[in-house]
Image (cartoon, rainbow, N blue to C red):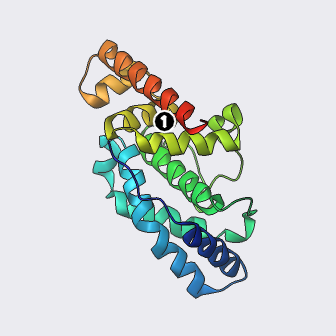
Amino acid sequence: MTHTVAMTESDLEKSVDLLRRAQAGDEEACNDLLARYLPRLQRWASRKMPLTVRTMLDTGDIVQEAMVRALRHLDTIEIRSDKTLEVYLKRAISNRIVDMYRKPRRDYEQVNEELPATGPTALDVAIGHEARERYEDALETLSDADCQIITMHTDLAMTAAQIGQELGKSSEAARMALSRALKRLVVAMQQQTK
């Protein structure tokens, strides 16, 4: 299992302070936020990206590009908790991953890639903001394989057949792997509420 290093309470307070300073136009604070979050979000994103997206661009490039674009719009973020910026950046990166995956399939659509999505994702609407944070935290406790297959299903809306094709498995094997991964996710989320 892969676990990410949690930020200490003082780190979180510093992040909130940096976010407020960056929102006020402090470029140094913005650069500090980028340096603080980039390595952790690269690890997070690499676990979620299907192999076909990884071959299109390096994970680090996708994360950095999404973060730089998102940080341009810091003034739109309402600071609700110490995880506000992290959730915002993860959403921007997830949107970029989805764009990279779907781009060959939707070259006829015109998308303004300059702006991260401001509205809630379908998953956010379905489970709510706090549950989304619990979902993301629980996802980080799962294996890379479980994280990736859940992401392909929830974020990329891939069917079992598509997941199977991506992973080199039959659609039945992919369906079973997804089912097992989702059960582990539910257990992980339940453990968080105890």
Q: Position of residue 105 (x, y in %)?
A: 45, 37
Does residue 103 appear in the picture of this structure? no
Check the image and name the residue furthest to the left. Answer: 168
- Tell me the quarter of the picture where residue 127 sits: top right
**Residue 141 occupies which quadrant of the picture?**
top left
Locate residue 166, reporting x and y percent.
30, 31
User: Up-down: is 94 above or below 185?
Assistant: below
Residue 184 position in % (x across, y down): 43, 27
Q: Is residue 166 above or below residue 69?
A: above
Q: Is residue 58 left or right of residue 185?
A: left
Say if 142 sits above or below 33 in the image.
above
Q: Residues within 10 Å of mark 1 (few under 14, many from 20)?
A: many
Q: Quadrant of the C terminus?
A: top right
**In what element is the residue under mark 1?**
loop
Name which residue type carries label 1: Leu
Q: Quadrant of residue 11?
A: bottom right
Task: Farthest residue to the top: give it.
Answer: 172
Question: Would residue 55 be visible to someone looking at this image?
Answer: yes
Q: Is residue 57 left or right of residue 122?
A: left
Residue at 67% across, 70% down: 74
Q: Nearer the viewer, residue 15 or 51?
A: 15
Query: Which residue is found at the position 33% from the left and 56% from the top?
Result: 57
Which residue is depicted at the point 52% across and 45% down?
137
Q: Is residue 158 left or right of residue 128?
A: left
Quadrant of the frame with the N terminus = top left
Q: Which residue is mark 1?
A: 156
Residue drawn at x 52%, y 80% as measured from the top left: 32
Front in this rendered view, residue 186 or 85: 186
